[in-house]
Image (tube, grey):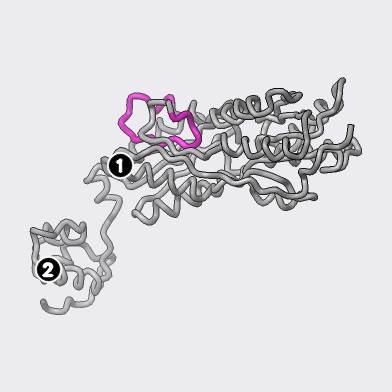
Amino acid sequence: MHSPEPFHGSRPTSRDVARAAGVSQATVSLVLGDKWRGRVSERTAGSVREAAAELGYRPNLAARNLRLGSTRTALLVVPALTNEFFAHVYTGAAVEAARHGFGVVLYPSPDGIGPAKDPFASAQAALDGVLASSMATDALKAFQGTDLPLVMLDSDPADPGAAAHVNLDVADGMRRVTGHLLDLGHRSYLHLASAVPSWTFDARAAVLADALRGSELRTARAQLNVAAAWEAAHQALTAPGPRPTAVICDDDILAAGVYKAARRLGLRIPEDLSVTGFDDMALATALEPELTTVRLPAEEFGGRGMAALLAALSGERPEPAVLPVELAVRGSSGPAPAA
């Protein structure tokens, strides 16, 4: 092969590479598309790659993907990026996607909570598959009738509408929380539950109710923000009857609202009131005392979900996955106060 002459045009094309390597454009397409084995010799493939490198040729991936019927783009549907947990889920998904040459389009709910509104109407033609949080399942109604593979995160594994389910072991997380508090002698509880409808919160509530059978258990609900949590906790802690000695929260943000309510009421944490959370985001160690909470591997969760989606896109049938969680015991939980 002769060394290619320097390219002086606006951008080298596959025709320029073919001319420099002394081959056809079809051969260039096979080599640069990594489909040359068995069709083109090693020597010719090397010549094409050398010519492309010297010319500074970069294939037009957008045009190539359109020809192949694939854009190498996945949609990630989450409630909101204002919640640190979902920011980490996105990071994990994006890193895994990039390893396979895929990009990730993010679709957070416009309202920041609950189901996202139909993201598919305008985007469907530009997507290869969908990765979605169970908190955004209503957004998937527009997905019905399409052939886009769907992988669900933290969702009912019995739901047949997904190619795969990747879950966190939230049931085990709640069992660890209740076991820890029972060991500390608590028998009167408040469950500050998320008001967002979702399988993951329903699963936690079911385990909690079963584990605390025989104890006094009240439930209050709040949206996932500190102000709503403070108001709900204040009302529950000042309601008639014996005050709970422990508050179990569905989320670290809800726990922050309980801290505010306790401070306003002159209650000490954990001497008068133990508090636990769920997620173990940065907020958990910013609170004083630091929050006892369930540590969720958010980035690994996003990465495993994306890996399952990529497997489905390759024609495989991904096995359901359940990621283990840990209980991080810190200063917010202590022995039940004496009666």
Which amino acid type is marked by label 1? Leu
- The secondary element bearing badge 2 is classed as helix
Q: The C terminus appears in which quarter of the rendering? A: top right
- Which residue carries the number 2 mark? 42
Q: Residue 42 lies in what quarter of the image? A: bottom left
Residue 270 appears in view: yes
Question: Dot 2 surroundings within 10 Å: few (below 14), some, or many (20 or more)?
Answer: few
The magenta segment: 141-157
Give the farthest residue toward the bottom. Answer: 3
- Which residue carries the number 1 mark? 313
Q: Position of residue 9 (x, y in %)?
A: 25, 68
Q: Which mark is residue 278?
A: none
Q: Residue 36 lies in what quarter of the image? A: bottom left
Which amino acid type is marked by label 2? Glu
Q: Residue at x 60, y 33 (%)?
A: 113
When the figure is inspected, residue 212 is found, relative to residue 12, above or below; the finding is above
Q: Is residue 142 magenta?
A: yes
Name the N-terminal-most of marks 1 and 2: 2
Callout 1 touching callout 2 (CB < 8 Å): no
**Label 1 – label 2 distance at C-alpha:** 29 Å
Q: Residue at x 30, y 31 (%)?
A: 147
Q: Residue at x 57, y 34 (%)?
A: 171
Q: Residue at x 60, y 36 (%)?
A: 112
Question: Dot 1 surroundings within 10 Å: few (below 14), some, or many (20 or more)?
Answer: some
Q: Nearer the viewer, residue 146 or 177?
A: 177
Q: Nearer the viewer, residue 227 or 305?
A: 305
Q: Position of residue 315 (x, y in %)?
A: 26, 40
Q: Is residue 32 magenta?
A: no
Residue 108 appears in view: no
